[in-house]
Amino acid sequence: MKDSNSPLRVHKWRTRSWNIKKFVFFGCLLAVGLILVYINNNSTWQTENNTSAPKLQESSDDCPLKTIVPVENAQDNVIPGSSNERPLKTIVPVKNAQDNEIRVSSNDRPLKTIIPVENAQAFVISAYYDDRFPPPVVRIIGIVDRQQSNQSLYCHLRFHNETISVEAEVDIHSNHFGFRYGSADLNCKCPGITLNSSVSVTTSPQNNASAPRLSIRNIKKGKPSHFTYEFAVCISVMFRNYSNVLQFIQTIEMHRLLGVQKVFIYKTSSSRELDKVLGHYIKEGIVEVIPWQITSFINVSHSWKPKAGGDLLYNGQLAALNDCVYRNMYTTRYVALTDLDEIIIPHRHANWGELMKFLEKQYPYKEGFLFDEHHLFNSVDGDRFAYKEWNNVPGVNILRHVNSEPVDRKSNARKMILNPRTVVQTSVHSCLKCIDRKLFVFVSSDVAWLHHYRYQYKTRLGKDKLIKDTTLWNYSDQLIKNVNSLLHATNILRATQ
């Protein structure tokens, strides 16, 4: 009988045990490899067969993308971005998604703020709930072809997890000046409204789930208990690669000195230097830019006269101003409607706050105030404020333009500071449709003027016939300091030297 504990038998047993362990180990590795191959192939097959999924492109410079991708049937399609992300500003609508709305951020490059209605010569811009008159409506700011004004348009209102379709009442504003296209309100009667409601517009009474939807704003009841801004300015429209950098900075800084807290700018195009300035002001929160890509759809005019050519009055200015009024309806106490080369300057008061307290006391039942326009034309007066460091900054130095033409009451293009809650439709120089026209009053020129910096209108007037207005010089010390600070912060002075 052999000894079971002999060295030879122990060696054979250990060798066989080691072989079994090696077999089990490599077998496990093979199994794991096969599983990974299967998972990878299955994922690739799903991706290739999901043709409705949006494809995401990577940035060429490997910066993190700041992309919002709506997920099919998702209730909350929000992806928070870190503060150091480089925004790509991309929104990818997904078919059948419940929230396929187009939103505009103040720091976004042009998104679709002007949306064409399929099979119609009509465009929608924004939607606002308006319950100031019975029955309440969703008022859509738009632009329509007056030659197709009889075409029916339909609103598809989404709220309470259901969609209700109603025919829109198309109200074309009367101040179209004979151009083919005009600003319009598309009024949609609605039985009720909730937060996060939206609307789309089509030419069919049947809802089209793929039609772009607009968020419905101003879903509030009653008078606001407080305002986010005491004063805001609506400026329209920045176009033709606008490059008047120095005057633009002076205009924004003057408005800040006067007490303005927010400036809304509808922008088609601007120069590279101006974009630097806009970016700085956007970060500070004083400016909000609304992309205004109207020229992508309509041959616009740069004039208010149809004979100058184009199909829409002055770059769609009226639609922009009406959108701005409704945008500020419940957030701002007073809104001023002006252009890039205009500032309302008080003559008796240091700022707009003091001016409006005076006017409210003087006219206790008025809600809108119209200011006479004075042309301070582009010819300099003396060497005062002729700073060499500003010589290479593009634009006009308004501190040197103090000669004004006498006011022509018959052709005066006044501008307004108004309570937006009294306005239904606005024009450039007056309220087109108001709750009550008697709520508006003309302000005497000895109280405040509209300073309009432009070319000389009446070229035959001699210097002795002009009015010298140096009111702006009262703000010169702080204005110059603020302008220089901005120029240094944006490196514009260094770039032009």
Image (spheres, rainbow, N blue to C red):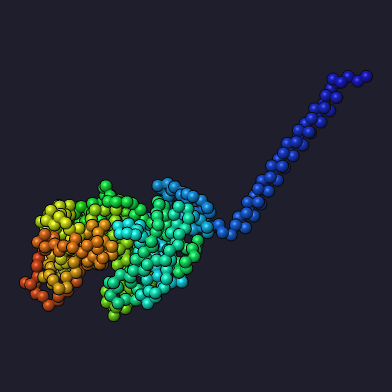
Classify 412 as above or below 278.
Answer: below
Q: Is residue 113 left or right of residue 55?
A: left
Could one spot residue 383 in this view of the protein? Answer: no
Residue 383 image point, x, y percent:
12, 63
Please name the residue shown 12% across and 68% down the image. Answer: 404
Q: Is residue 103 left or right of residue 425?
A: right
Closer-to-camera residue (101/208): 208
Locate the C terminus and report the quarter of the image it occupies: bottom left
Instruction: Report the label total.
Output: 0
Picture quadrant of residue 142: bottom left
Residue 11 image point, x, y percent:
82, 26
Residue lying at the far bottom of the rendered structure: 307
Residue 172 image point, x, y percent:
33, 70
Please name the residue shown 39% across and 54% down the image. Answer: 193
Picture quadrant of residue 278: bottom left
Please name the residue shown 23% across and 57% down the image. Answer: 419
